[in-house]
Image (spheres, helix red, strand yellow):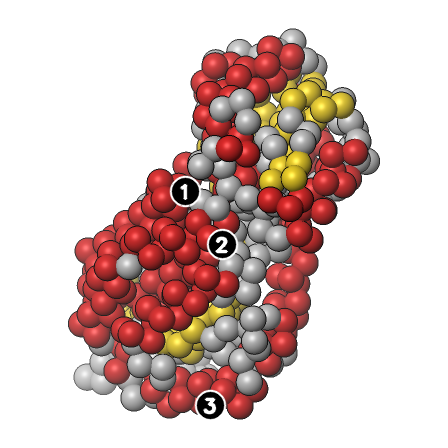
Amino acid sequence: MLETPENVILETFEAQKAYFATHKTKSVSFRLEQLKKLQKSIKKNQTKIEEALWKDLHKSPEEAYLAEISIVLNEIEYHILNLKHWAKTKRTSTPLHLRPSSSKVIYEPLGVALLIAPWNYPFQLMMNTLIGAISGGCCSILKPSPDAPIIAKLMEEMIVANFEPEYIRLLQGGKDTNTVLLQQKFDVIFFTGSSRVGKIVMKAAAEHLTPVILELGGKSPCIVDKNANLDVAARRIAWGKLINSGQTCIAPDYLFAHASIKDKLLAKISEEIEKMYGKNPQESKYYPRIVNERAHQRLQGMLRQGTIHSGGTFDEADLYISPTIIDDVKEEFDVMQEEIFGPILPVLSYENINEAIDYINKNEKPLAFYYFGKNSQAKEVLYKTSSGGGCVNDTLLHIANHHLPFGGVGNSGLGKYHGHNSFLAFTNQRAIVSTPTWIDLPFKYVPFRFYKWIKRIV
């Protein structure tokens, strides 16, 4: 894919700054109109979106709709229903010693936003951030990943057909385009991708003190305790791990199974994989492919250590790697040193839950955390660990609830979005105190003659 010329980037950025300065995007009615335009365009192009995701990632229409399109449509609808309330100035209480002043919070748009999305859920992760920017009243430059070029081109066509470039524009390109974009003084940057690139984005933003929302990743653990419902756990782990062929930032990255149930659990996971994808997943229309040869070769290297419990086959020409469970895993193995981002599930075991907790806590805080077992034990495990989000007795579902904030913590991300949190991510909560002039109490003025009295109430 060709890079966007530097002059086009600079012209677009300046045009959006000028457009934002007209204050047109601040109108709630304007924002609602744009959200409805986007909603209509997505519904109109649903089949094209599904076809593009099939060509880029071999996602079935069913998976494309459930994991990408439906999430975006639900998010838009939620914003349309709630934006007037969110954007309304909020009165707050004022302490006695500041009266008769009154206090309020104004939610003002941050300005011109840069939105950078990855390739694994290229439509959902680009459009969901755009919804927040529109809802917050910002102008936006969108930058999709060049590794999913067909859906990136379709999204560009949709943006061109519905929005003026000085308001919203999608720019194509790779590293060079990103470099020029990150040199500009945006009012907010929203980046979704790896922790490695997230550090580059944050460093560039620091040059201008630009606020950032970083949705990153990491090694999200999945614990299955001895008292878990193994049939349900196996089915939900297989599903959560293999959606998009494991190329999901919140996929269960590795499994911690109680030693007493490990063998039984692994057998059940293998059975559930076969039920979902058949004896040969390569022939299933529901099994996606790895994004490119580079990623495929990286995953191949992870198959060389440990004991292959099931799977372990691959076809580089077809960008296929079979659903694979690796047993007898050690901490120093490659598969435990970086986020997998593929259909490979390494397995560790424990006798005491504190062994799993200690291992998780000595590593970077993950984006997601999954626990299968009794709710009473889940409370203790959640209390003793940290993660951006997670599920008890399920996987992935927290990302689909727009009432919940979504984001990481520490190395797995900075800032939250989805639902109301997306609106907040693109707005400044401006605190205002209004004081009447009909009275001017002398307490605050030098030489503080009433200090002894005011000290009692402050």
Is there CB contact under 8 Å for labels 1 and 2? no
Position of 80 with respect to 409 (left or right) is left
Determine whether the residue tagged by mark 1 lies in a helix, strand or loop.
loop
State the image quarter where residue 166 is shown.
bottom left
Front-most of residues 432 and 421: 421
- The residue positioned 39% from the left and 65% from the top of the image is 154
- The residue positioned 68% from the left and 20% from the top of the image is 309
- The residue positioned 43% from the left and 60% from the top of the image is 151
On screen, residue 302 above or below 137:
above
Q: Check disc 3 and report the residue beneath it.
A: 11
Q: Earlier in the sequence, mark 2 or mark 3?
A: 3
Distance of label 1 from label 3 (alpha carbons)? 39 Å
Q: Residue 207: where, in percent of width, then height? A: 63, 78
Of tags 2 and 3, which is closer to the observer?
Answer: 2
Mark 2 surroundings within 10 Å by alpha-carbon count, few (fewer than 14), some (14 through 19), many (20 or more): many
Q: Check disc 1 and report the residue beneath it.
A: 60
Q: Earlier in the sequence, mark 1 or mark 3?
A: 3
Q: Check disc 2 and report the residue beneath it.
A: 56
Position of 424 with respect to 143 (left or right) is left
On screen, residue 182 above or below 136:
below
Q: Amino acid at mark 3?
A: Glu
Q: Residue 244: where, in percent of width, then height? A: 50, 42
